[in-house]
Amino acid sequence: MQPSEAIDSWHAWLEAHPDQASTFLDRLYQRQRDLDAVFAGEPARTFARPAFLSAAQHRLVRDSSQVLLECAEVVIARIHDDPQLRAQIPMVPGEWELLRPCPGLKHQQVIARPDAFLVDDGIQYLEFNAESPAAVAWADLFGQTFRELEPMQELPWARETVGPQCQRLLLDAILDAGRAYGLRDAPRVAVVDWKEVPTIREHHLVARLLEVRGATASVVDPREFEIRGDTLYAGGQPVDLIYRRVILGELLARREEPGPAAMLEAVRRNLVCIVNPFITRVPGSKAFMALLSHPRNEHLFSAEQVKMLRAVVPWTRVLTAGPETLFGQQGELLELARIHRERLVIKPTCSYGGKGVSIGPETDVGAWDAVIDKAASEPGDWTVQHLVPIPEEPFPVFDPCMSTTSLKVSLNPFLFGGRYAGAIVRLSRSSVINVSAGGGVVPVLTLPIIADPSCP
């Protein structure tokens, strides 16, 4: 079955059952509240159908995202001993000294969530959210809320769809990392972020799930940490494993405060296992996609990995002065970026939440030139990338009657401990697709295929 067929079938059911369909969003939002799947205290904005992948698309997403993860591990393993490689990932002063692997871990990149567009029969990865991706524990809950809706029960094919397995694989990855580090089977886990972040309820959910698996777990603000001897404490309780949701840049901005300083010191001295380690700042940088897309780095990877990277990573460069070839034209990169505005996007190299993104065809010439001038004065702080066509799909909305609207679609696969776990889709009318910037989210379900053992 193909996604277009599933979409038509779902929409036809809604049109045939207007009385039931009109209450969909109310019920979805209420179930999110019941399950504590809330963002900034409110249910995450959603729409009245899930997203669908064909079995072939599922395999493509799974296989390509895992190759991207493998390449991240290659770079992490080599970057400290390779000055040329390190020079390609701009960092602020003081960061490199903290970017060390966590001892014993098989995968330093324990948790990852790339951002991608499904384009025609392929996929393009725009970013690699590696440091502290959000929504990792919610994906299953979003799927659960949709599975309770009538179309999922009444459409025969819908009952055979496969959803994400994020919670189980997330917990496996965190606890496996602790064991690899040398901790006991019941680690003392701190889920760490600022108490005022909009995703705080997700952190509490992860802590509860870890306790079900036998760990001692709590949500901890970095300001609560202190070191006594060789032990890290939070709220008077010892901690030996950190599930880090706080962004390193934010932590460094407050490194003079006692709590953040204690956390940084504990990691530096290997007093705790940390997931994800600070070294994941490297693939989390927008410059990582530039590293993957540049031919000079292909020697780092296997022939199979290079083939995949060429297919799924768009041309990306750190936007600095220097010679380059762009769309077949040779010249100075800053000037080429001015000339080809309508075919490019510029992003801050170290940022998240869709902040500061300039999309060429949606940015006037003056504003575009101003961003390039800023990039020229701030070497390494900006990254330029080929503009990838943004896929759109019709989604039902109720305003107050059911209608469909075309929304831009971003696919976000989750990887835990080296394993693909499923995905969510973020939706928006805007070309900058981000939940914190006003977008919405729906679960991703893989459509059935007869006796296909490759779909977990």
Image (cartoon, rainbow, N blue to C red):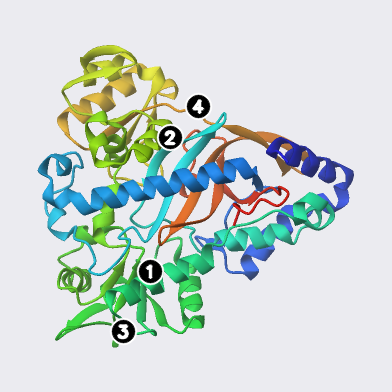
Say whether disc 3 or disc 4 marks the residue closer to the N-terminus. 3
Say whether disc 1 or disc 2 marks the residue closer to the N-terminus. 1
Residue 290 pos. (x, y %): 29, 35
User: Which quarter shows the N terminus?
Assistant: top right
CA gap, disc 1 and disc 2: 37 Å
> On the image, numbered disc 3 is attached to which residue?
235
Q: Helix or strand or loop: what does disc 1 sit on?
A: loop
Q: Quadrant of residue 396?
A: top right
Foreground label between 2 and 3: 2
> On the image, numbered disc 1 is attached to which residue?
195
Disc 1 packing (10 Å; few <14; some 14–19; many ≥20)? some
Residue at x 19%, y 50% (from the top left corner) = 78
Residue at x 57%, y 64% (from the top left corner) = 37
Foreground label between 1 and 4: 4
> On the image, numbered disc 4 is attached to which residue?
389
The answer to whether residue 346 is seen in the rendering is yes
Q: Is residue 188 left or right of residue 377?
A: right
> On the image, numbered disc 2 is attached to which residue?
312
Amino acid at the residue labelled 1:
Lys
